[in-house]
Amino acid sequence: EIVLTQSPGTLSLSPGGGATLSCRASQTVSSSYFAWYQQKPGQAPRLLIYGASSRATGIPDRFSGSGSGTDFTLTISRLEPEDFAVYYCLQYGSSPITFGQGTRLEIK
Amino acid sequence: QVQLEQSGAEVKKPGASVKVSCKASGYTFTDYYMHWVRQAPGQGLEWMGWINPNGGGTNYAQKFQGRVTVTRDTSISTAYMELSRLRSDDTAVYYCARGDVAVGFEYWGQGTLVTVSS
């Protein structure tokens, strides 16, 4: 099983700033099958990034993804109030499909 | 537009079973796998398994093997997830999500809260 470890667990930042979220895999993950999600309280997760670096439909260009192999990054620039949420990484190229434990992005 | 409509909240006693439905619309049901993901209160996302509606093949996470059964009814474009021998730590929101090889899980149901309590 591929374990995805996200860091930091919580990130406290101010609107207007930038955020860097990390996801490290215990084994090599195919970039084609790596994604990032945003989840707000009471809502289903929302796809942000797929294929490690492609933005999903309707996702603003403030969100960008990068990385390959075992290290992946989600970068959010110019933080807006609506960006404060929990973020999860996902790999679905290897069974079982696994999620990271999440990074909470909170307003400082 | 793609929509996944799940059944309503359930309260079950320990040892019982629960069956959650997920009705798909806006696309050809048999063209995409359907996955089930759960989220315990205040916790992260946990993948449970998938079904290929075209043929009915399934794959489950080892953790749920023997307790989970995912089925589908193609005539009404609906997938089902049944979890048996419920325990209190099965209390969670259960989501269905459409699987797409290219993008992962782009479309999700609204979630179904299953509460297991004596």
Image (spheres, coloured by chain):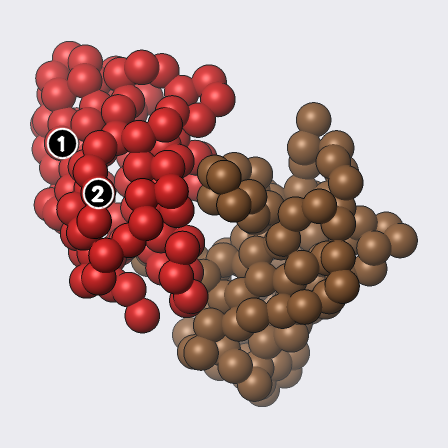
Q: Quadrant of residue A48?
A: top left
User: Which mark, by number, is residue A20?
Assistant: 1
Relative side of B95 to A32, left or right: right
User: Which mark, by number, is residue A68?
Assistant: 2
Chain under disc 2: A
Q: Nearer the viewer, residue B98 or B110?
A: B98
Q: Which chain is red?
A: A
Residue located at (53% from left, 72% from top): B60
Q: Count neighbours of disc 2 (C-alpha within 10 A) and say few if under 14, some if 14 to 19, many if 20 or more.
A: some
Figure check: A10 above or below B88:
above
Mark in the foreground, 2 or 1:
2
Identify which amino acid the numbered label 1 is placed on: Thr
Quick check: marks 2 and 1 in contact, CB under 8 Å? Answer: no
In terms of secondary structure, where does tag 1 sit?
strand
Q: Quadrant of residue B28?
A: top right
Q: Earlier in the sequence, mark 2 or mark 1?
A: 1
3D distance between C-alphas at marks 2 and 1: 16 Å
Question: Which x, y percent locates residue B6?
Answer: 67, 49
On the same chain, marks 2 and 1? The answer is yes
Q: Quadrant of residue B69?
A: bottom right
Relative side of B94 to A62, left or right: right
In terms of secondary structure, where does tag 2 sit?
strand
Question: Which x, y percent locates residue A69?
Answer: 21, 49
Q: Count neighbours of disc 1 (C-alpha within 10 A) and say few if under 14, some if 14 to 19, many if 20 or more.
A: some
Chain B in the picture: what colour? brown
Name the image quarter holding the N terminus of chain B. Answer: top right
Figure check: A88 above or below B51:
above
Residue B72 is at least partly visible in this image:
yes
Residue located at (35% from left, 52% from top): A91
Chain under disc 1: A
Question: Which x, y percent locates residue A14?
Answer: 12, 21
